[in-house]
Image: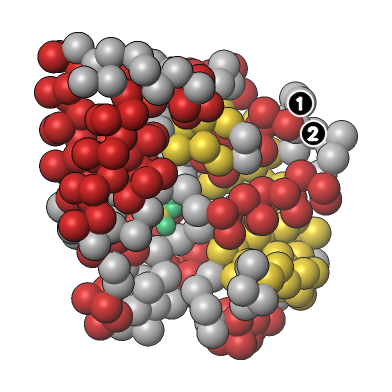
Amino acid sequence: MNSLQALKNGSNLLREKNISTHIIDSELLLSKILNKTREEMLINLNEKIDEKNKFIFKKYLSRRSKKEPIAYILEEKEFWSKKFFVNKDTLIPRPETELLVDKLLKIYSGKKLSILDIGTGCGCILVSLLSNLNQSKGYGIDRSKKATFVAKMNVKKHKLSDCTKILNVSFENFFNKKFDLIVSNPPYIEKRKIKNLSDDIKKFEPRMALDGGNDGLDLIKKIIYKSKHILKVNGLLALEIGNEQVKKVSKKLKENNFRIKDYLKDYKDNIRCVIAIKNK
Ligand SMILES: C[S@@+](CC[C@H](N)C(=O)[O-])C[C@H]1O[C@@H](n2cnc3c(N)ncnc32)[C@H](O)[C@@H]1O
């Protein structure tokens, strides 16, 4: 069997399982197995697939048929043009989070700062910020011990061990000096809405990364309260939030001595990030 035949078989199998991205998924899985980029694989479709690789491809297709996200099968996700190791213990980084990183890098370009990333997951936010802000330092904390293993791997992979500390601790129990920037993409889905999420998300992504309590705002409110105490005056709190949470989050921020600096919209024109300044 050559690559072309394998890709066709793979794509057909995934289509039968109603996976709308069946063609690209089949290509991504096979190129990973062949240790080639997708483009390299596609210009050499006559390449023979040996028995071992056929077996691995079959296993990957079977996992994808059950709606397991591609990123978990490949154990990799690109974020802010860097590759991150991910697994089922971490949320898969999302494009809207890149918007937040993009904005923060514009605000802090050329500056040296101390950063706290609450709910660091695979570490994508912190690693992306620190890779671009020379001489800055940061903590990434997460309540999930397994997620912190992954974040540590990514810190090492991107050679940031000297300026980064990853800790397995809930932000409520984290006491430290004051930060210039606190950033967080916390769990913000309303508990009762988790069952309506697509299978890829609700069956595979960690519940601890999704569940924001009864109104989705449990953690956000607590993070705002905590940040009030561990941010420097004029420091920034940058939060990713859920759709339609902006009014309540803005109110909470104002009640806790913050003023709004910026709102960021996602590609569907929904406000998905809030950046606030801590007042004196
Ligand atoms: C939505 S995920 C974000 C992961 C990553 N920052 C990203 O943007 O892809 C939220 C993360 O918060 C963590 N988390 C949940 N409750 C927490 C708490 N009380 N303290 C610290 N981290 C928490 C979860 O384990 C999860 O890794």
Seen from the viewer's position, the closer of residues 233 and 191 is 191
Q: Amino acid at mark 1?
A: Asn
Q: Quadrant of residue 113?
A: top right
Tell me the residue that label 2 is attached to.
112
Q: Disc 1 vs disc 2: Cβ atoms closer than 8 Å?
A: yes
Q: Residue at x 70, y 68 (%)?
A: 264
**Depth order, front residue of 153/175:** 153
Relative height, residue 192 to residue 95 (above, below): below
Around disc 1, counting alpha carbons within 10 Å, would you say few (fewer than 14), some (14 to 19), or many (20 or more)? some
Quadrant where the C terminus sits is bottom right
The quadrant in which the N terminus is found is top left
Residue 28 found in image quarter: top left
Q: Is residue 227 above or below residue 51?
A: below
Left or right position of 117 against 13: right
Counting other residues with Cα less than 10 Å from the Cα at mark 2, is it few (<14), some (14-19), or many (20 or more)?
A: some
- Inspect this view and state whether residue 134 appears: yes
Q: Which residue is mark 1?
A: 134
- The mark lying in front, picked from 1 and 2, is 1
Residue at mark 2: C-beta within 8 A of ligand 1:
no
